[in-house]
Amino acid sequence: MRFAKIFDLLIFLLAAASFLFFQSYPVLGFALVALLVLRFVIEYRGQRKELSLILVLSSLAVTVLAVFTDRYSVIMAAAVITSLSFLALLFQGAGRTIKESPKRGKKILAGVGIVGLGLSSILVGGLSYTAFFPDVLARSLQGQHSTEPSLEKTMMALCIIRI
């Protein structure tokens, strides 16, 4: 069970990294495929939960498709599907861990983990939105690059100084 959660975390981190490093996706993609195959073997030999198997197989199929096509839209779709699938798998037993642990330190650590997963889901949501709509990010950053004052602002400042 612990190996499965470690693989889930590694796969989630690689899928989230593929939002940023999509130019080197063949390297990330092959690492993701290898980890997904290992995760499938762990799940198939272990508990065989249907939801976990479906999420792992769908992520594996989309990642293999993204590696072979090497197109931006397919890579981003694979990153969204894989990261959200494994975020769901990481959340799967999180509430149960808090209730079952008798020690206060483990409960606090599990609570911090859940908060971290929540922040990660917000991060993945933002990255997936800007991956499919990059013009929103470009428009929001456009005003921050101009360091020269415009002519209108200079004239308004001169008028205020005269008054």
Image (cartoon, helix red, strand yellow):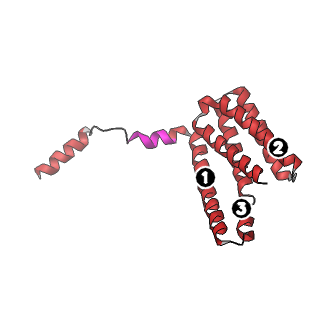
Q: Position of residue 110 (x, y in %)?
A: 66, 63
Quarter location, residue 142: top left
Q: Does the magenta stretch include residue 142?
A: yes
For marks 3 and 2, give the CA distance. Answer: 21 Å
Q: Where is residue 151 in the image (x, y as percent from the top left)?
A: 24, 38
Local secondary structure at mark 2: helix
Local secondary structure at mark 1: helix
Q: Name the residue under label 3.
A: 94
Looking at the rendered structure, the kind of residue marked 1 is Ser
Badge 1 crowding class, 10 Å Cα cut-off, few under 14, some 14 to 19, many 20 or more, is some
Residue drawn at x 71%, y 54% is: 90
Badge 2 crowding class, 10 Å Cα cut-off, few under 14, some 14 to 19, many 20 or more, is many
| Badge nearest the viewer, 2 or 1 | 2
- Mark closer to the chain start, 3 or 1: 3
Q: Position of residue 154 (x, y in %)?
A: 21, 42
- Mark closer to the chain start, 2 or 1: 2
**Vertical arrangement, residue 117 with respect to residue 65, above or below:** below
Residue drawn at x 75%, y 69% is: 100
Quarter location, residue 72: top right
Q: Can residue 38 be seen in this view?
A: yes
Q: Mark 1 points at which residue?
A: 120
- Give the magenta range: 136-144
Local secondary structure at mark 3: helix
For marks 2 and 1, give the CA distance. Answer: 23 Å
**Vertical arrangement, residue 119 with respect to residue 145, above or below:** below
Is 45 on the left or on the right of 134, as rendered?
Answer: right
Q: Which label belongs to residue 40?
A: 2
Q: Does the magenta stretch include residue 69?
A: no
Depth check: 137 or 109 in front? 109
